[in-house]
Amino acid sequence: MTVLNDITKLDNYEDEVIFDVVLKLEKSFGLKFEKDAFYNVQTFGDLCDIFTTKLQGDNSDDCTTQQAFYKVRNAIASTQLIDAKTITLDTKLQDIFPKDNRIQKIKEFQDELNITLKILDIKSWFGWTIFIGIVASLITFFFKWQFAITGLLFFITIGWTAYKFFAKEFEINTVRQLTEKLVTENYVAVRRRKGTINRQEILAIIVDTFSNDLDIDKAYLTRNDKFSWAT
């Protein structure tokens, strides 16, 4: 049984966090809103309405996820020199991209796809070490600012180097998850026929993005669910 206080809802998040997700959706849908576009937004339904109203294009019932899968499959086949027919939604990415040259091969794959996706990460223990080091450096500001600056520069440099040269761990596991990520983050770019959208998919993408990024159960992403600033 879930304890009520443990349930994550929209009103648990401040506006800065919410609008980080909004910016992600803007990029995916190829939109740019004015600063005051969300001034009167009070509920999740209000926010969804702004996106669906702003998003223009001829409606087409074709499946964007299917189109994305074909793009992913062809890009993998082309760069990895394997038969596209052997690639399925359940194919594991670690079986396609060997760890030894994974960073380079992922770059080639994304160049072929002509879309950039963040799908590689460093080992979790390494990431936590860098994070703790940065936090410790910030705390040191209260005692010795010179040490704090040195620590920050050191751990930021280590972090940049790690993500640049040692990020070989997949954040996702299968071609299916890669396809879904592609659609969620690059909806307009994935569409086979430019200038078209499938309006039935738009709301689902908005809900999925908020649910995945903020760890909110979809049951708490209804039209009437309010944001923290709602009066």
Image (cartoon, rainbow, N blue to C red):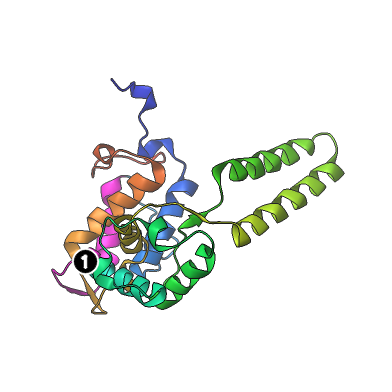
Q: In the image shown, does 93 or 194 lie closer to the viewer?
A: 93
Residue at the location (27% across, 79% down)? 194
Q: Quadrant for the N terminus, please.
A: top left
What is the magenta range? 43-65
Residue 11 lies, in percent from the top left, at 39, 37
Residue 41 lies, in percent from the top left, at 34, 50
Q: Is residue 11 above or below residue 95?
A: above
Left/right placement of residue 61 relative to residue 13 reads left
Residue at the location (37% across, 33% down)? 8
Q: Residue furthest left?
A: 61
Q: Quadrant for the C terminus, please.
A: top left
Q: In the image shown, does 85 or 141 lie closer to the viewer?
A: 85
Residue 143 lies, in percent from the top left, at 83, 34
Whether residue 52 is in magenta: the answer is: yes
Q: Is residue 190 above or below residue 6?
A: below
Q: Which residue is mark 1?
A: 66
Evaluate whether residue 89 shows in this view. Answer: yes
Secondary structure under the numbered disc 1 in the rendered image: helix
